[in-house]
Every structure is written in structure tokens, then in C-alpha cells.
Image (cartoon, rainbow, N blue to C red):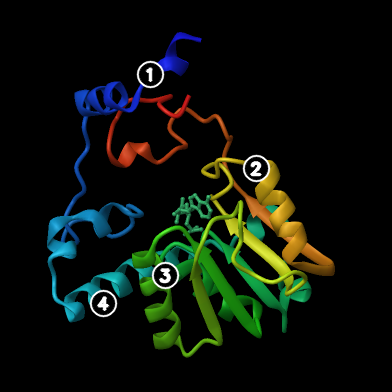
Amino acid sequence: MWFATWDVKTAKFLMKVQEVVPKPPSQEMSGLHGVFHHESFVNASEEERKAVMLRSAEVKYREEIEYPWDHYFGADLRPLLEGKTVLDLGCYNGGRGAAWYEHYGLTRLVGVDVGQTLIDAAEHMASVKGMNAEFFVGKGETLPLEDESFDAVLSYDVFEHVSDVRKTLDECWRVLRPGGQLFVVFPGYYHPTGHHLSQVTKLPFFHY
Ligand SMILES: C[S@@+](CC[C@H](N)C(=O)[O-])C[C@H]1O[C@@H](n2cnc3c(N)ncnc32)[C@H](O)[C@@H]1O
């Protein structure tokens, strides 16, 4: 198809047509990665960066506490997750995982996400909350984790972003112990703005 031949230059040009620039941490806390790309975060001191990471994680933590994702399953998941070792695939800043850890009474939480800043944020949140947790940079398609090491994999709004859903599912299967469970919530893979490129451009359907 004609649009399959777009090169990166063309794509960047089109993205610029309706460009979105990240808002500063003083204005935006829940807008996912955007705030971590703002110059006032990038150039901040270690202490200031940690404060921003924590505020960002607390937004996600509160979101999850106020509307626990049990709603998506129509069931209280606590009996299935209490005392378990859980992987948070696409853990972002660690805020939602911290809420899961408390709400479900997990024994251990491991998080994976694609960027070091997110892992730093998740580690900071976990240390503030005193969690038994560990975080790794990695991708769902190639998890940097051992076989059969989790009782459950939880993933919220991540599968619509992975480049290969089949591989990601295979990886979840690989790291789950026999009898382990996968809990996934995500919007349509081909949702017009489900790609998060809306953090840099308002053009819909761009991932197509
Ligand atoms: C909409 S956010 C959801 C974050 C978090 N799960 C939450 O609910 O707060 C999507 C997350 O998926 C991560 N992500 C995107 N592609 C990924 C991949 N291939 N493997 C793992 N994580 C990925 C992003 O970096 C981002 O943190």
C-alpha cells in the first residue's frame, strides 16, 4: 500500500504538521511519558527528578486505588493474587504496580518497561512504599526474565503498543509457572490514537 512506503523523514514531517510538545511537570503529571521528556525534567537535578517521578507515580497509584482494575474482570482478583509473585508488564512509573502490590497483598512484584527513566521512577516508588520489588528495562517481546518464575502476569494498557502480540504472549507463557495466570487489559490494537504518538502529534491512525 502507498502509505507502507513512507520513510522516516516523511513520517517526521507529517508528525510536525500537528505537533504536540510535552507539558512541563508543573502542568502535567498523568500524561504518561510526556513529562519525562520535558526539558525542565531532563535538565533537573537528581533530587528534582526524583520528586517529579514520585508525583507521577502517585497519580497512577491513586488512579488504581480509586478504580481498581478488578472492575474490568467483574471479579475480586485478590483471592487469585494474594501472596503471589507477579510481573507487571509495561510497568511505566511503578504507580499502578504499587497499588496492585498493596491491594492484592502480593509477595513480590517485578516490573518491565522500555525506558531507564521509567525503571528509575518505578524503583523510587517501590522504595518509598517499602515493597519487595525489582524492575528491568526490557520489552514484552523479549522479556529479560527466567522461565517459569511468576504466578501471574498483569498488564494494563500495554498490548496495544507492542510490535508483536504473538511474541509477547509467548513470552508471558514462558515466564509463567505451570498453572500461572495472565491478566491483560488493553484497548483495540488498531485504535486510531491508541499508539501514544498523540504525545508528539495529533494525527490519528499514524501507526498504520
Ligand atoms: C499506556 S502506558 C500504561 C502504563 C502502565 N501499565 C499503567 O497502566 O499505568 C503503556 C506502557 O507500555 C510500555 N510499553 C510500550 N511498548 C512496550 C513493549 N514492547 N514492552 C513493554 N512495555 C511496553 C510503555 O513504555 C508504557 O509505559
Distance in Å between CA atoms under marks 2 and 1: 23 Å
> Measuring 51% from the left and 10% from the top, which residue is drawn there?
1
Give residue 31's position: percent from left, percent from top.
32, 52
Q: Earlier in the sequence, mark 3 or mark 1?
A: 1
Q: Which residue is mark 3?
A: 119
Give residue 138's position: percent from left, percent from top.
51, 61
Image-quadrant location for residue 20: top left
Q: Earlier in the sequence, mark 1 or mark 4?
A: 1
Label 2 crowding class (10 Å Cα cut-off): few <14, some 14-19, many 20+?
some
Label 3 crowding class (10 Å Cα cut-off): few <14, some 14-19, many 20+?
many
Give residue 200's position: percent from left, percent from top.
27, 38
> Measuring 37% from the left and 80% from the top, which residue is drawn there?
124
Q: Which residue is mark 1?
A: 6
SS at circle 3? helix
> Measuring 43% from the left and 24% from the top, which residue is drawn there?
205
For badge 1, the amino acid type reads Trp
Q: Which residue is mark 2?
A: 165
For badge 2, the amino acid type reads Val
Image-quadrant location for residue 57: bottom left
SS at circle 2? helix
* Side of 188 where 92 appears, left or right: left
For residue 50, which numbered disc appears in the image?
4
Question: Nearer the observer, disc 3 or disc 1?
Answer: 1
| Closer to the camera in the image, 186 or 115 | 115
